[in-house]
Image (spheres, rainbow, N blue to C red):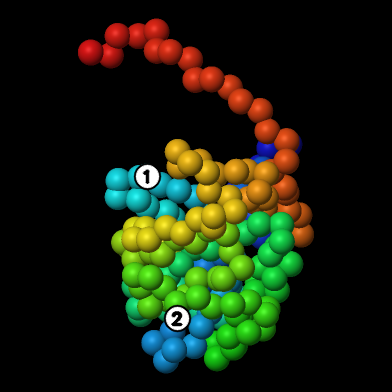
Amino acid sequence: MDFRPEDISHGDVGKLINAAVVPRPIAWVSTRAVDGILNLAPFSYFNAVCSNPPTIVFSAGVRVLKSTPTHKDTLTNIRETGEFVVNFVSEHNAAAMNLTSVDAPAHMDEFAYAGLTPIPGVVINAPSVGESLIHFECKLNQIVTISDQPGGAHLVIGTIVHMHFDDSIYREGNYLDLAAYQPVGRTSGAGYVRVTDTFTLSRPPSEFNLG
């Protein structure tokens, strides 16, 4: 089956993209509004960018509420404060993460709603999720607007300024114990995936003289 994206709705395009690009890691992003209200929401268009400077990116999609294109409080808070935390999702906190995906009013604290513990930042003013085994405190690098229309998104690029790894998963030599970490990823629809079946492929040596 072949499609031109312009021949089907952006909703159907999104369904097909989400079904194809799997598994996707989840950025569980916590922020603090300028009035002090805490916010927490998951984003599954997320990945690492580079290590120098250490950089991540996630996509905050444009939603439609009451026929009006709008964006999540996460994006507003990051624009206004320039700070956020990416918390990582494991099997033990996946249900709580799912609770925080609810569309909620700006004054609602998703930490309290999901029964989670906000931990003060080490470098920034935004809190991390106490139940998360890994969290990265980030300063905003830039926001790239792809589209302000329904189905569009804003790419939030952040510079990592502090990293936390729980002692239960950190191993000597800067390794993480995957079996202890139990990360969870997104597939399509209501689907999630565990990282329980892995294999290795050694990178081949270069056969070319690149000078």
Amino acid type at circle 1 is Cys
Q: Is residue 88 above or below residue 128?
A: above
> Would you say residue 4 is visible in this rendering?
no
Position of the N terminus by quadrant: top right
Question: Would residue 129 be visible to someone looking at this image?
Answer: yes
Residue 97 lies in quadrant: bottom right
Q: Which mark is residue 154?
A: none
> Residue 90: percent from the left, percent from the top?
66, 57
Quarter of the figure with the C terminus: top left
Residue nearest the viewer, comparing 122 with 190: 122
Say whether residue 91 is left or right of residue 129. right
Going from N to C along the chain, the mark reached first, 1 or 2, is 2
The reply to whether dot 1 and dot 2 touch (C-beta < 8 Å) is no
Whether 6 is drawn above or below 147: the answer is above
Looking at the image, residue 143 sits to the left or right of residue 106; the answer is left
Residue 203 vertical placement versus 42 (above, below): above
Q: Residue at x 57, y 71 (%)?
A: 130
- Based on the displayed image, in which of its 4 quarters is residue 173 positioned? top left
Disc 1 from disc 2: Cα separation: 26 Å
Q: Residues within 10 Å of mark 2 (few under 14, many from 20)?
A: many
Residue at 52% x, 44% y is 171
Dot label at residue 32 = 2
| Residue with the mark numbered 1 | 50
